[in-house]
Amino acid sequence: MGEYQSIKMDTDDDGVTLITLNRPDRLNAFNRQMIAEWTEALQLADADPATRVVLITGAGRAFCAGGDAGEMEELAVSDNVSRKDYLWRGVHRIPMAMARMEKPVIAVLNGTARGAGLDMALFCDMRLAAESATFAESYIHMGVMSGDGGTYLLPRLIGVANSFDLLWTGRLIDAQEALRMGLVNRVVPDAELFAQARELARSIARQPQQAIRLTKRALYQSLDTSLETHLDMVSSHMAVLYDTDDFREKLKAFRSRSR
């Protein structure tokens, strides 16, 4: 895997790849370099046979504070085409890469996630938060709107009314309120965050991987299809899974237990 300046990446023996956003002095705010490296890391992890589950976290006391302030200042004095390209051809490579990934991606929210940093966490399949973590769709405080997928994912995760609450006020919420809303899956003590995240990742990594990935594909595709289309697709997936060694082995084990 490549050598990076603004992220870290490593894969353990259980097939868990950890991607760490590594600009702690800037609360892991992303710049163009981080976007390029982060995109490459996601693509490499998805293609790497050794990777079964991906964890994403931040170095230091933040997950990600959004976009780099210096680059935002540059955009403010640029033309509209440049601003559009910064997002569409730049930042948006992250949500698109995550949307294309077949492998499970879990956000390990070690600290604050704000603005585009929160939007990036939303594109992960699951989110574990430390008790001290905080969250905000803070775009409105800058006079702009969520520009990196928040308006797409928030209503799907927490409903329309809660989405407007966060997007229109930009207010900061703590981990427990995020849990009640459905924004995160679990809240754990700070000292246990990475241990619990790795255990969750390893438990998923131990499962039959074809079933894990086809389940992910079916779940997301169901959001944009009819029931009939969904059931047609799922029957095809099941037909494939019945032909895997994992299924045959588990069926044999089940039969031996039931005798």
Image (cartoon, rainbow, N blue to C red):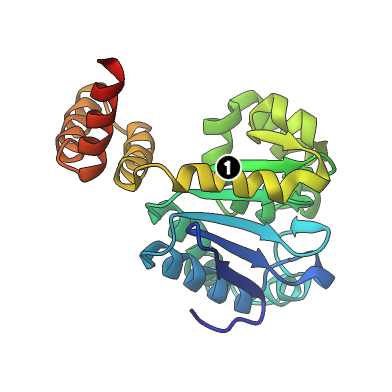
**Helix, strand or loop status at disc 1:** helix
Considering the image in quadrants, where does the C terminus appear? top left
Kindly indicate the quadrant of the structure image that contains residue 5: bottom right
User: Does residue 254 appear in the picture of this structure?
Assistant: yes
Instruction: Please name the residue shown 38% across and 41% down the image.
Output: 216
Say left or right for 246 vs 199. left
Say left or right for 113 vs 14. right
Kindly indicate the quadrant of the structure image that contains residue 71: bottom right
Kindly indicate the quadrant of the structure image that contains residue 169: top right
Residue with the mark numbered 1: 200
User: Does residue 124 appear in the picture of this structure?
Assistant: no
State the image coordinates of residue 43 (x, y, percent, origin top left). 43, 67
Residue 49 versus residue 216: which sits nearer the camera? 49
State the image coordinates of residue 129 (x, y, percent, origin top left). 72, 42
Kindly give the residue lying farthest to the top in the view shown: 259
Residue 37 versus residue 235: which sits nearer the camera? 235
Instruction: Please name the residue shown 33% across and 32% down the image.
Output: 222
Residue 156 versus residue 217 in the image, above or below: above
Say left or right for 248 vs 114. left
Residue 200 versus residue 230 in the image, above or below: below
Residue 200 versus residue 165 in the image, above or below: below
Q: Amino acid at mark 1?
A: Leu
Residue 68 versus residue 194: which sits nearer the camera? 194
State the image coordinates of residue 78 (x, y, percent, origin top left). 65, 77
Instruction: Please name the residue shown 73% across and 33% down the image.
Output: 178
Q: Residues within 10 Å of mark 1 (few under 14, many from 20)?
A: some
